[in-house]
């Protein structure tokens, strides 16, 4: 992974000092609430329902075991012993004290971590597919490009006060697990017919109140021009994005109101001015960044699949976990392992200090000392030898981390919701738990197969409900919590927005509705069709009719 | 009068008056001996009268305006003010870079309006070289804020080479 040099370290230390000074001035009454707000937000600090919340960046989801141990330390000493993985590859601490925030940032800086630009109206943490670099079928590893974008966007002097927050995702895999098309900017690595790898850049995607799938602004950008192309988009947005109405200030509204053709023209006109400037990447810099993401020392010609085959036959519980949570690795003899953080009774994405330390140990023992977090709120050990999978599974079982849920109905993406968040209209964590309790038969869940369920506690859509195969949105009806259900969404390469089923439901009705939707799917499915495949074939109506015939 | 920092020092005396709202050219007689930074509309409407006024000329752009209408006139101005109606309005950063990098404006670019300590470093990176501080700002603290960071990653006005062309002390133009 990327290793800081003296420049990176220096800037981070200066940032900690700057924020310490800002916090001191605020506490001394020299900065007003309104003035401190954008400053603390650009350091990841929100004021939540119960306490401040500190959001720490995990650049493109990558963590070393040393960093994981530091997160555990922070959870233990500054929080109530846990952290929460977010839907944008960050980790949040829900209980720190404001006065301690500068100290936490200083601790993070020791391990090359920070909370820079994890909130506020600036360019946020860049995200990517959590299988980057190990997926068997990717065009090219996206992580060096993420790192280049991280550096370019960190403390960008021109874009610190944008009309609204700005999220960039980069993706090099055909499957696209980065939700690339619903980002303000989505960058795809593409291979041209000539064999050259380049970028296709989308803009104007997003969720929130107005979900939109991004549209191509650049069809083909040579690698060295990546940053000038991004800077051109940012400049047009900084200037022209609406600032009169918070709900119309994302780039998606600008693209829509301008028209994508006109928007492209403006961006390309800006690009012509700066293309070829000093911001053009050098071969040396591209190679430097790539050098941090080379393959670890894989054992070649691994002769261990016999061990795996034997254990798979011997132990059906292990076999189930292996079928669900281990995915194909580009390197023969290795597997990509997902540690599910979706145990029933635990808020999706929550992880304790003890679990973090345990996972750090596992990363050292099994996966070259690194782990990743996914926007689906799980943790990935990306490089595990197949012959050691059984041992890993046994280890995971000792901490109840062996839930075989990856991609299943219970692998729910969920925002913190009304239990923590000041913006929420309704709770979301208890809904996830009720669904998990309702569908608690592992064999049945596996039979249902891939089914992405996403829950948001309000229309800001942190739980990405618009792109769930089943999306659940908490709404407030005269002071009571109700849930609006949508179906048919996906954030993968064939992205689509979910369509609302109809009138919303009381919380205790939600699991029953889920049951009906699953029943329709299972009655209608052909061969190996997933829920989404079936939905796309038979359409909305059969689901809608079944649900409202049942419950109304 | 606001305290003004220019080129890294506090100005003992600032000769510029920013005409915030100027409706007609009669204001030009009101304060003899001073130079004016006039609103864009004033320049566009009363250019002839302003040109008769002795001394140097300045114009200011609000954050929703761009340098384009004055692109041909830039040599006329000793100073261009860029306004921050509120400090979270970031449009003037783009205007500053455009004036420096695209139009090659070499005069003074002054931040006016809601200008406080916590913006100064980014402003200076984008090409501002003077800052009319909000009345409640401590000018010594603001001077130090210009040095909050010793370097930055990006290509910008103060350092056109991005860090990746400078790492290790070797400059790759």
Image (cartoon, rainbow, N blue to C red):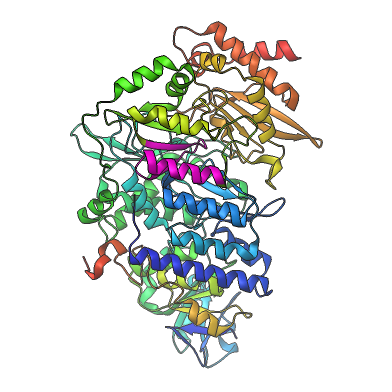
Q: Closer to the camera, B98 or A457?
A: A457
Quadrant of the image containing the C terminus of chain A: top right
Measuring from the top left, give residue A514's x and y in whole percent: 64, 19
**Is residue A224 visible in the rendered structure shown here?**
yes
Percent x, y for residue B71? 38, 67
Could you tell me residue A284's position as x and y percent? 21, 56
- Left/right placement of residue B75 relative to residue A464 reads left
Q: Nearer the viewer, residue A435 or B38?
A: A435
Relative to A155, residue A503 above or below: above
Magenta-span inclusion, residue A380: yes
Q: Quadrant of residue B25?
A: bottom right
Q: Residue at x 26, y 48 (%)?
A: A290
Task: Point out residue A504 in the picture as x, y percentages from the top left corner.
Answer: 72, 25
User: Measured along the vertical axis of the image, is residue A312 above or below residue A285?
Assistant: above
Relative to A48, A307 lies left or right: left
Q: How many marks?
A: 0
Q: Is residue A339 visible?
A: no
Camera-nearest residue between A44 and A239: A44
Which residue sits at x=43%, y=72%? B149
Q: Residue furthest right?
A: A478
Q: Which residue is more in the foreground, A260 or A368?
A: A368
Q: Would you say residue A51 sits in the magenta stretch? A: no
Q: Quadrant of residue A435?
A: top right
**Residues rendered magenta in the picture:** A354-382
């Amino acid at each position: 992974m990327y290793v800081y040099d003296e420049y990176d370290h220096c800037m981070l230390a200066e940032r900690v000092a700057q924020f310490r000074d800002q916090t001191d001035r605020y506490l001394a009454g020299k900065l007003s609430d309104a003035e401190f707000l954008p400053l603390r937000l650009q350091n990841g600090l929100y004021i939540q329902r119960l306490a401040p919340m500190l959001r720490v960046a995990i650049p493109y989801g990558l963590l070393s075991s040393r960093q994981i141990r530091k997160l555990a330390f922070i959870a233990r000493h500054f929080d109530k012993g846990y952290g929460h993985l977010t839907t944008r590859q960050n980790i949040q601490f829900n209980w720190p004290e404001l006065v301690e925030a500068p100290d936490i940032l200083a601790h993070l800086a020791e391990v090359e971590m920070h909370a820079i630009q994890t909130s506020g109206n600036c360019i946020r943490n860049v995200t990517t597919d959590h299988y980057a670099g190990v997926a068997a079928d990717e065009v090219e590893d996206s992580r060096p490009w993420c790192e280049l974008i991280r550096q370019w966007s960190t403390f960008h002097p021109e874009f610190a006060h944008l009309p609204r927050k700005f999220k960039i995702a980069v993706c090099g895999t055909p499957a696209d697990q980065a939700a690339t098309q619903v980002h303000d900017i989505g960058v795809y690595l593409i291979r041209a017919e000539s064999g050259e790898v380049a970028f296709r850049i989308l803009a104007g995607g997003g969720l929130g109140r107005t979900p939109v799938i991004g549209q191509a602004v650049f069809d083909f950008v040579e690698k060295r021009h990546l940053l000038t192309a991004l800077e051109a988009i940012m400049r047009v947005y900084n200037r022209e994005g609406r600032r009169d109405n918070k709900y119309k200030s994302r780039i998606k509204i600008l693209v829509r109101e301008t028209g994508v053709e006109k928007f492209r023209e403006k961006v390309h006109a800006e690009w012509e001015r700066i293309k070829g400037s000093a911001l053009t990447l050098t071969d040396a810099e591209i190679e430097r960044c790539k050098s941090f993401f080379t393959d670890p020392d894989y054992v070649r010609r691994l002769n261990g699949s016999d061990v795996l085959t034997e254990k798979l036959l011997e132990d059906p519980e292990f076999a189930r976990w292996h079928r669900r949570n281990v995915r194909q690795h580009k390197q023969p003899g290795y597997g990509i392992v997902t540690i599910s953080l979706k145990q029933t009774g635990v808020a999706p994405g929550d992880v304790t200090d003890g679990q973090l330390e345990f996972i750090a140990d596992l990363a050292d023992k099994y996966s070259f000392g690194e782990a990743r977090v996914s926007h689906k709120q799980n943790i990935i050990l990306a490089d595990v030898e197949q012959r050691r999978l059984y041992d890993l599974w046994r280890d995971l079982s000792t901490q109840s981390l062996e839930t075989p849920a990856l991609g299943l109905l219970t692998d729910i993406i969920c925002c913190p919701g009304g239990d923590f968040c000041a913006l929420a209209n309704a709770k979301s964590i208890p809904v996830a738990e009720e669904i998990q309790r309702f569908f608690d038969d592992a064999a049945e869940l596996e039979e249902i197969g891939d089914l992405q369920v996403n829950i948001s506690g309000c229309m800001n859509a942190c739980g990405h409900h618009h792109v769930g195969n089943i999306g659940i949105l908490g709404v407030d009806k005269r002071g009571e919590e109700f849930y609006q259900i949508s179906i048919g969404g996906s954030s993968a390469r064939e992205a689509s927005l979910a369509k609302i089923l109809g009138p919303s439901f009381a919380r205790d009705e939600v699991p029953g509705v889920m049951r009906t939707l699953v029943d329709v799917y299972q009655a209608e499915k052909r061969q190996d069709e997933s829920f989404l495949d079936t939905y796309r074939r038979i359409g909305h109506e059969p689901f809608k009719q079944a649900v409202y015939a049942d419950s109304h | 009068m606001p305290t003004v920092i220019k080129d890294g020092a506090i100005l003992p005396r600032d000769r510029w008056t920013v005409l915030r709202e100027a409706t007609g050219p009669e204001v030009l007689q009101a304060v003899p001996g001073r130079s004016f930074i006039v609103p864009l509309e004033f320049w566009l409407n009363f250019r002839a009268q302003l040109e008769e006024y002795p001394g140097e000329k300045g114009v200011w752009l609000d954050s929703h305006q761009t340098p384009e209408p004055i692109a041909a006139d830039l040599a006329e101005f000793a100073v261009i003010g860029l306004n921050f109606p509120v400090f979270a309005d970031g449009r003037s950063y783009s205007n500053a870079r455009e004036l420096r990098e695209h139009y090659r404006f070499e005069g003074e670019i002054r931040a006016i309006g809601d200008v406080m300590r916590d913006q100064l470093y980014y402003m200076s990176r984008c090409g501002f070289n003077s800052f009319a501080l909000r009345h409640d700002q401590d000018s010594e603290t603001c001077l130090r804020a210009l040095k909050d960071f010793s370097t930055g990653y990006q290509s910008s006005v103060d350092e056109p080479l991005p860090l990746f062309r400078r790492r290790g002390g070797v400059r790759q133009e």
